Image: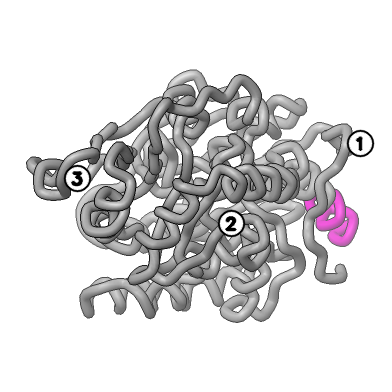
Amino acid sequence: MADTEVQPTAGGGTTTRPLRIAMISYYLPSGSKIGVGFQVHELASELARRGHTVDVFSDCPPVPGASYGHRHVRMSGSLRTFRFATALRREDFSSYDVLHAHGDDYWLWRRRTRAHLRTVHGSCFEEARHIHGLKEKLRMTLLGMSEVLAALVADRVVVVSPQTRRWVPRSHAVVPNGVDMSRFTARDATRADHPVILFVGTWHGRKRGRELAEQFRTVVRPAVPDAELWLVSRDVPDGAAGTAGDGVRILGRLSDDELAEAYRRAWVFCLPSSYEGFGIPYAEAMASGLPVVATPNVGARYVSDDGRAAVLAELPDLGTALTAVLTDPDRRARLTAAGLERSRVFSLSAVADAYERLYADALESRS
């Protein structure tokens, strides 16, 4: 199969017959804030809506109200992600047409279904370059090696951005992560009556919420006195808002509907990560008509079409870039239009179409 990149489709859906699909994901929204789990939940829900039977094998508990099946592979103790991969060897996948792994399938060398796909949601090798701490660097390097092994095991290997191919030489297609355009939409958007910057991520680590708050305190707020920074984050330390100065609001964890509303209320979205394999919040913000300012990590460059649909600025220049967008309504309007156009590529419907085509192709090849 030739290398391909998904393109949006007008109608949604394909003629693929109903399939039995086993998905593997250590993460799900019920037990983790990791973006892969949210994407697996969305894709499994969309495929189930289309009539496929989908079961997700995960260490996380079932997501309440999910339309797909759940198989709980319980783990405890240390090195759980590595032991999860070993535990999958004991699972029976023989009743499924397709095994679609979003991680942890590197020990599944013996054929267990008619077709085996692997989606690589970014490179652990790349993340190891940016993460702090020797122990974490070692863990990410070992996980990177597991991604190489998984690429050899699967019939079809999918990456979520073209740049990821640098670390996954055996890849067959680029299929980005998908956004539910019925939930994240610019329709009925009512922006706040004062400038608001929205952040979705973690205070610590590669998402760099703490660094954004410092840029807001020292650069943005003095230039735009009525501006606010809304932090959708669960790990902000007690008292951090006071330290960051006036105008910082900690929203904690929001429901899907509450998050979509926050996108429709804010003026600018900012996620200054040191590394993103894709960065689904960028696409959600664009689909919601929200201008994006980001640091030029791998995911932000891809989602923004190399800065044509967003503003990319290095971390030291982030406050200046945010101030310029907040104070220029014409520029915000141009960024909104460019982001809405770009977000069509990341429609969940188009992404599900692409996977249905990959499933059918892999099954036909095996036949």
Where does the magenta region start and end?
A: 358-367
Graded by Cα atoms within 10 Å as few (under 14), some (14 to 19) or many (20 or more), the crowding at tag 2 reads: many
Dot 3 corresponds to which residue?
236
Do tag 3 and tag 2 residues touch (Cβ < 8 Å)?
no
Q: Amino acid at mark 3?
A: Val
Residue at x-position 47% and y-position 44%? 268
Relative height, residue 354 to residue 313 (above, below): above
The quadrant of the picture occupied by the C terminus is bottom right
Graded by Cα atoms within 10 Å as few (under 14), some (14 to 19) or many (20 or more), the crowding at tag 3 reads: some
Percent across and percent down for residue 294 are: 47, 59
- Where, by quadrant of the figure, is residue 278 drawn? bottom right
The quadrant of the picture occupied by the N terminus is bottom right
Left or right, residue 221 beside residue 172: left
Query: Is any part of residue 175 visible from this angle?
Result: yes
Inter-mark Cα distance, 1 to 2: 36 Å
Dot 1 corresponds to which residue?
15
Dot 2 corresponds to which residue?
310
Kindly state the secondary structure of the residue where label 1 is placed.
loop
State whether the magenta stretch is mostly helix, strand or loop. helix
Between 364 and 12, the one lying in front of the other is 12
